[in-house]
Amino acid sequence: MSQLSTAWRIARRELRGGLRGFVIFLICLALGVGAIAAVGSVRAGIAEGLAREGAAILGGDAQAGFTYRFATEEERAWLDGVADAVSETVDFRSMAVAGDDRTLTQVRGVDGLYPLYGEVVLEPPMGMAEALADTGLPGGVMQPVLAARLGLEVGDRFTLGTQEFELRALLEREPDSAGAGFGLGPRTIVSLKGLEGSGLITPGTLYETEYRLRLPESADLDALEAAAEDRFADAGLRWRDSRNGAPGVARFVDRLGAFLVLVGLSGLAVGGLGVSAAVRAYLDRKIDTIATLKTLGATGRVIFATYFMQIGVLALAGVALGLVLGALVPLLLGPVIEARLPVPAVFTVYPGPLVEAALYGLLTAAIFVIWPLARARDVRAAGLFRDMGGSGMGLPRPVYLGVIVGLLVALVALAVLFSGAVTLALAAAGGILAALLILAVMAWGVRMLARRAARRVRGRPALRLALGAIGGPGGETASVVLSLGLGLTVLAAVGQIENNTRNAIAQDLPEIAPAYFFVDIQNAQLPEFLETARAEERVGRIDTAPMLRGIITGINGRPAEEVAGEHWTLRGDRGVTYAQVQPEDAVLTEGGWWPEDYAGPPLVSFAAEEGAELGLSLGDRITVNILGRDIEAEIANFRVVEFGNMGINFIMLMNEGALAGAPHTHIATLYAEEAAEADLLRTLSRAFPNVTAIGVRDAIARVSEAFSGLAAATSYGAAATLVTGFVVLIGAAAAGTRGRVFEAAVLKTLGARRSRILASFALRAGILGAAAGLVAILGGALAGWAVMVFVMEADYAFEPVSALAIVIGGAVASLLAGLAFAWPPLAARPARVLRSRD
């Protein structure tokens, strides 16, 4: 106890000397903690917004949904019985036609109660009843982008199916748009009554109905959900309520937030390098003090405790500064952030994300601080008085290494706990540790190469001096390559992944993808549809298949979610088709096909990869609810399903008898020359107004647009890491000022001009930055390759433009930091500097 009190007394006295030398320390911690706290606060703000505005986002206190059908009389009576009001809507895709122009739109048919909550904003301002009223022609509203594509103005006419509508207003905002999910086309809203003459809502066509409920204040959502699932368990009813009004958005925000927090941890790792460098630089300046304390009888434990307490106080200050930064940024930028979000958000101070960020910051600081402190405590006083500093020191004692490993495990465990993504967190932690190890090896390699190159350079003194300084002991090589290299590696990896994904979407897929998907082709229309399409010579091929949709509700007699968790195949409905004979392109991995004359119990061919993820085996039984009817089918075989080829692919393919009598339509994919696509669309749309065409290029454009937002958010996270790396780089340059002053004094004494010394410093900084950039390219390319091949299961191609930018950026950043601290050494007088080293 006396030793700790002595250590604290010494630490407190030294703290009175101010924060000189700890500015970089504080900035590194504050930036890392602030970035993580800000991301967590934004995620919490969105979650709070979703919770508060759940009813408006969903469109009601609760919602019952059905696929391919409207509610039965019994179902509607139950819904009317538990709710004060029920609003009925139908949602589907169709072609909006105006003259010769036609384009895909997401249509919503609504009743007179829509919307139960919130307000639809129209231009010119009017109520929904007026906008959709039938005054000779039923009215409709559509988003401005859709009206612009069709060349429509308010008062013009457009057609859905066989029904003509009048455009009464432009749709500026839907209160429940966030809960509607991702749509391939802009929105059109018309009345349910107006749709009756369109020919679009027929048995077997692809549509969904939703019944939004306004419930009494005393309603128990848990009890209602349980009652709905119990009463209509076999009817395919999907229940949602205001507690999770936009599950897709919430899931996306959680995953993106977790990913950005893990990117922020890489920023903290970079900041940790700066923390470690700042501590080493501080201890170097405290050599005389430490030597004196040891001479007066202070033990190594007292020395360690003294500076651990002192630096611990400063670490708390840095974390506190980061928490203030992380809490203020969302508050100050809240209106800007919310304007770009598809959902409401409530930005205030949330303790949870701040606690999470603080724990990350303190653990990181401890991990990077203990190492230099533990090494310093074991240096002898005599060595310190001889100005040996840290030279000759080996690894810390095993006990300290054990503590560091323990703290590292705790940090990874916290990342797993807080992110909720075990695989992602472990992969990120492993990637950061591997990157640091690789960068350390690369830094050693750069030193060795520079040392050898310095011996061979002739006639270029400035370059030889720069290479000698890079290859010499105690230089800045390790600090620059590690700090700047890790930041650039994260940015390089993001750039490689982003460019490869864009290339896969924008270039590879169109070459192998069909021009259009056609859906809702009625059975009686199929022969004529095929004949009309094949009449065009530029059509390459047409593939068709029966099309139904069903919800996987059970596996081997148990609820599917109990068996397979939250697998994506269980969220919502999935495509189902049938075939009696094995398709030519069906490649089986297990099992065999049923006989051509098979007429027994339902059998299903299941996608091999998805089946393995669900833990399915041959002979297992899958229950699929189709149009309110449960069909239990035995898995007869598994087959390869390649969703990447953009063809007709179904997870489940049943024998024909299993779906006999079920109303259904057909889907077709049409492959044609690009020049023929517009003519084909006009011809087929006129002949078959109920058939919906989905342009593959338009769909790809929507996916690319969504990906752009994700890529931008990830780039911002990587940029925060890079900024931290640049701060560490400045710290390394500042810490090396003392050495460069002595170096400049010796060179001046030997007759070197200032210009040559400055050129040497500049070359040193530029070479180190370029080396860090080259190392980052290697690390980023490896990370990009791993993500593309093993996560996205796509091809990888090295992207040189972003790589070149990384190298140039690293060289420039290092050069600027080096030059900023080059003037004091040049201005120092040699005599004064050399006398102080006597």
Image (spheres, helix red, strand yellow):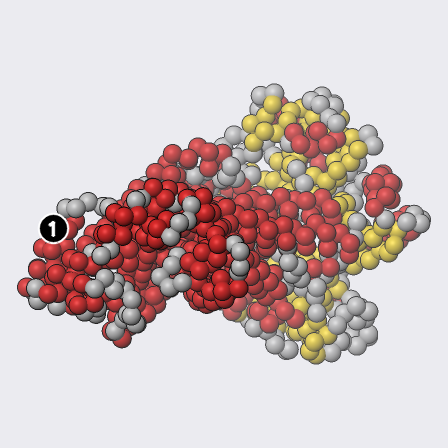
Q: In this rendering, is residue 801 above or below 622?
A: above
Residue at 55%, 61% in the rendered image: 778
Residue 460 seen from this side? yes
Amino acid type indicated by mark 1:
Arg
Looking at the picture, how far across and down is residue 451, in whole percent? Answer: 47, 65
**Residue 563 falls left or right of residue 653:** left
Residue at 78%, 30% in the rendered image: 98
How many marks on residues?
1
Viewer-nearest residue: 809 or 37: 809
Residue at 86%, 56% in the rendered image: 541
Looking at the picture, how far across and down is residue 438, in whole percent? Answer: 47, 66
Q: Quadrant of the C terminus?
A: bottom left
Residue at 24%, 55% in the rendered image: 837
Residue 135 seen from this side? no
Q: Quadrant of the N terminus?
A: bottom left
Q: Residue furthest front?
A: 751
Viewer-nearest residue: 799 or 84: 799
**Residue 134 image-quadrant placement:** top right
Q: In this rendering, is residue 307 above or below 600?
A: above
**Residue 305 falls left or right of residue 270:** left
Viewer-nearest residue: 93 or 765: 765
Looking at the picture, how far across and down is residue 49, in whole percent? Answer: 42, 40
Q: Circle 1 is placed at which residue position?
A: 13
Q: Residues within 10 Å of mark 1 (few under 14, many from 20)?
A: few
Describe the element under mark 1 as helix, strand or loop.
helix
**Residue 739 image-quadrant placement:** bottom left
